[in-house]
Amino acid sequence: MATNADVKKTKNDNNLGLIRKFSRKVKQSGVIPKVRKKRYHQREDSDFKKKTNALVKIEKRKEYERKEKMGLIKPRGRR
């Protein structure tokens, strides 16, 4: 998303005028609301990644239960 707000300096513009022009351009272009909307957006995991994560979780749970049966880990309390 590249939206540029170009402001050219004319010979009659001072620095404050340029800043005012720039902020007006940015407000009119609608860049700020777009950026604020996308700020905390996170992509959803793909189906493949969800499946692999589920398989890893199952394997870890099996390994934990095996170690728990062997007495290598203290049994955890049930909720």
Image: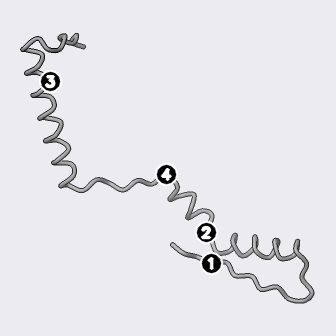
Q: Secondary structure at mark 4?
A: loop
* Separation of residues labelled 2 and 4 (CA atoms): 16 Å
Q: Secondary structure at mark 2?
A: helix
Rendered location of residue 28, percent (x, y): 68, 74
Work out whether mark 3 precedes mark 1 in sequence or the reverse, and give the earlier one.
1
Residue in the image at 62% along x and 78% along y: 4
Residue placed under numbered mark 1 in the picture: 4
Assess disc 2: are there few (<14), some (14-19) or many (≥20) residues with their C-alpha within 10 Å of its C-alpha. some
Assess disc 1: are there few (<14), some (14-19) or many (≥20) residues with their C-alpha within 10 Å of its C-alpha. few
Residue in the image at 40% along x and 53% along y: 42
Residue in the image at 61% along x and 69% along y: 31
Foreground mark, 3 or 2, reads: 3
CB under 8 Å between callouts 3 and 1?
A: no
Rendered location of residue 47, percent (x, y): 20, 55
- In the rendered image, the residue lying farthest to the front is 72
Q: Amino acid at mark 2?
A: Val
Q: Amino acid at mark 1?
A: Asn
Residue placed under numbered mark 3 in the picture: 64
Rendered location of residue 52, percent (x, y): 16, 47
Residue placed under numbered mark 2 in the picture: 31
Assess disc 3: are there few (<14), some (14-19) or many (≥20) residues with their C-alpha within 10 Å of its C-alpha. some
